[in-house]
Image (spheres, helix red, strand yellow):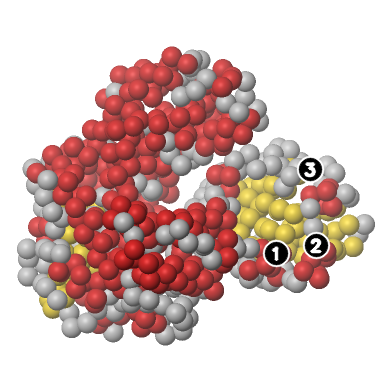
Amino acid sequence: MPWVFLHAIKDYYDMPWHLLRHPRLKATFNLTPPLIEQLLLYGRKGVECDRFLTLLAKEPQELSLDEREWVIKVCRSSRFDTMVKPLSRFAELFEMESFNDSELVELEVLFLLSWCGNYLRKSDLTVASLIQKGSGFVRSDKEALLESLLQFVPTILPLYEKLKNEGKISLSTTPLNHPILPLLIDMKSAKVSNPKCEIPPNHLSLKDDALKHITRAAKLYKDTFKEKPSGFWPAEGAVDEKSIALYKDHGIEWIATDEEILFRSLSSENRSDIYRPYSFNGVKIFFRDHPLSDLIGFSYRYREAEDAAKDFLSRLHRIFEREDSPTVSVILDGENAWEFYKNSGLDFFDALYSGLGAAKWCETVTFDEAARSDAKRLKKIHPGSWIYGNFDTWVGHPQKNEAWELLFRTKRDYLHHKESLSREVDEEMVSSFLAAESSDWFWWYGEDHHTEYASDFDSLFRERLIGIYRLMKLLPPVDLYRPIVTGESHHAFVSEPKFPIHPIIDGRVSSFFEWLGSGMIDESSTYSTMEGARGAVTKIFWGEDEKSIYIRLDGDMERLKDGSVVTIYANSNKEPIRLEASKLPKRGPLKAAIGSIMEIAVKKSLLAQDGLLSLRIEIERAGEPVQTLPGICELRIDLDDDYGKNWFV
C-alpha cells in the first residue's frame, strides 16, 4: 500500500516545515527504520517500488479489470470532508460508480493532489498550477505531477538532518522492525504486566534478536544521519527493565513511554509525578501526558483552530501554575491525525505554535535537551505499553499465542541447523525472523482489532516462517499451511469505532476504506453453526460523522430483499424507524440501499443530539420477526465520543 508515499507528500515534510515558520519552537521527531528505508527506496527506485504508483503511471487501458478496480479503490480512500470536498471535481468523481478512461485519469490526479501537503501547495509550481486548474486533467498532467512528487520525496530526510544539526529538532528511532521488545526478551513480562494474561506455554527467549533490532536500527540511523541515535521511542511505548538494560548497553541516553507505566511503577496516579524526567539504570525516561497528547490526536479536529489552541495553552498554563518547573511530554503520531483536520492541520499548527511562541512562561525543548536536566531515580519499572499499560494487545489470545508458538518452534528448528548454514543463507534467515517479530502481525490476530485483510496478514506471517524452512531445505511443518485466522476460530466480539466515517449509501462496498474505522459486531459468532440459518444478517458495521449515523448489514441480502422490513428502535425516539426493503428512501434525512450489502444513513436530527444512543434492529418477514440485532447486546453509540480510547496506531 502507498501510505509512506502519501504521508511523505503530505506530512513528513510538513511537520518540520511548520516548526521552521515559528523560530522559537523546537520538537523531537521519531523516524522508525521501516519509514527511513521506504523513503530511501522511493529515492532509489521511484514508482518501481510501489505497486499503486506503478499502476498509476500506466495508461488506463493498460490496466486489467482487477488492477483498475484496485486503483479506483485506493483513489477513493481520501477523507471526504477534509480532503475530497475542498476539490470540487474530486467530490463529483468520488460519488460516481464507474469511470471512463479520461475520468479515471482525473480521479488519479485529484487523489494525488488531495494528499499534497500545504508546503507542496505553496511551493511546488506543478502542484499549485494543477490545483488552480481544478479539472480536465490529462495524462501529461499526471506524468508531470508524479515526476514532481518523486523528486520531492528524497528531500525529506535531508531536511530532518539539517534541522537536527542546527539544534532545531532532535531525532530518535525505534527497534528495527517495530517489535514489542520485552516480549522477545522474556515472554513472562506479559504475565508480570497482567497476571491474567495467558502466555504461550513453550515460549523461548529471543534476546539475541532483540539485540539485533536495536543494533540494526542504530546502524541505519547512523548511516542516514551521520551519528548514532541518543534516544529511542520503543515500539508502542513497550518497556520493561530488561529492554531498558539493552538500550543502556547500546549507548541510548533516553527513551519515552506512557504515563500509565509510571503510575504502575510508583503505585500511584498522582498526575504531578509525570511532569519531570526520570532515570532508571542510567537511562533517562520521559512519560507521555496521555490526555494532552490525545486532545491533539483525537479531539481538537472537531474544534476551530483558535479555540483548540487556546484550550491546549490554558491546560498547559494550569500545569505551569500548579507544578514546580514542570517538564510536559506531549507525544503522538506525526502523520495520522492531520487528514482529519481542516486544511491538513495548518490552521491549528499556526494557532498553537504562535501561542506557544508568544508564551513567556513556556519554552519548547527537545528530548535531547530535556535529558540533560536532573532526573528522579526510579526503583523499578512496571512492564507494559502505552495501550492499557500491559501487553495484552500482542499476546494472550489463542490466535496471538498460536502465532508466537509457530515463531518459537521455527526458531528452535533454526538453532538445530544453524551451524550447517552458509553465512549468506543465515543472514537471509535472520532478516526473515526479524520481520516475523514485528508487532503488527500479533496486533491483527485475536478479536480486539478488525480488518478485512486479517487473512492476508495471517498468510504473510506464516509465509515468513515457511520461507525460513525452505532456506534450511527442510519440509515446513503442516501447521504453517493451516490458517490461524478462520471463521471457526472467531469468538463473539465487538470492535468499537475508531474514527468518523463517510460511506456512500449505494448498497455495495464502493471502497473498503469507506467503512474503515467503523465499529463491527460479528453476529455469526453469537450462535452455533447448527443455528446459523436463523438470520440473514451475519455482520453489523456502524459509525457516524457530524450529521449522520451509518449502519451496514452484511449477509444473505437476497433473503433480506424478499419482502423484509427493517425496523430501528432508538432510546431517544417514541416511534421506530421502519424501512421496507422493496422501497427504500434514496434521499432526505433517511437514506438506505440494498445490494450486496445493506447501507443505512440516519440524520442525527431524527435521533438524539447528544449523549448515549441505544439502538436495536428487528428484521420482519410477513409480519413475523425473524432476527433481532445485535444478538448479544444493544448497539450503543456515544455521540460525544472522541474515539481516543478505541483508536490505536
**Mark 1 or mark 2: whose residue is earlier in sequence:** 1
The C terminus sits in image quarter: bottom left
Q: Secondary structure at mark 2?
A: loop
Question: Residue 148 in the image: x percent, y percent?
Answer: 33, 23
Question: Residue 415 in the image: x percent, y percent?
Answer: 36, 70
Question: Residue 140 in the image: x percent, y percent?
Answer: 43, 14
Q: Nearer the viewer, mark 1 or mark 3?
A: 1
Q: Secondary structure at mark 1?
A: helix
Q: Quadrant of residue 587?
A: top right
Note whether residue 506 is visible. Answer: yes
From the image, tell me which residue sits under label 2.
535
**Mark 1 or mark 3: whose residue is earlier in sequence:** 1
Query: Dots 1 and 2: beta carbons under 8 Å?
Result: yes
Three-letter amino acid code at the position of disc 1: Glu
Q: Residue 253 got which mark?
A: none
Quote the CA–CA distance across marks 1 and 3: 24 Å
Q: Nearer the viewer, residue 255 or 93?
A: 255
From the image, tell me which residue sits under label 3.
584
Three-letter amino acid code at the position of disc 2: Gly
**Mark 2 or mark 3: whose residue is earlier in sequence:** 2
Q: Secondary structure at mark 3?
A: loop
Q: Is residue 74 above or below residue 465?
A: above
Residue under the image location 54 percent in, 33 percent down:
71
Quote the CA–CA distance across marks 1 and 2: 9 Å
Residue under the image location 38 percent in, 48 percent down:
337
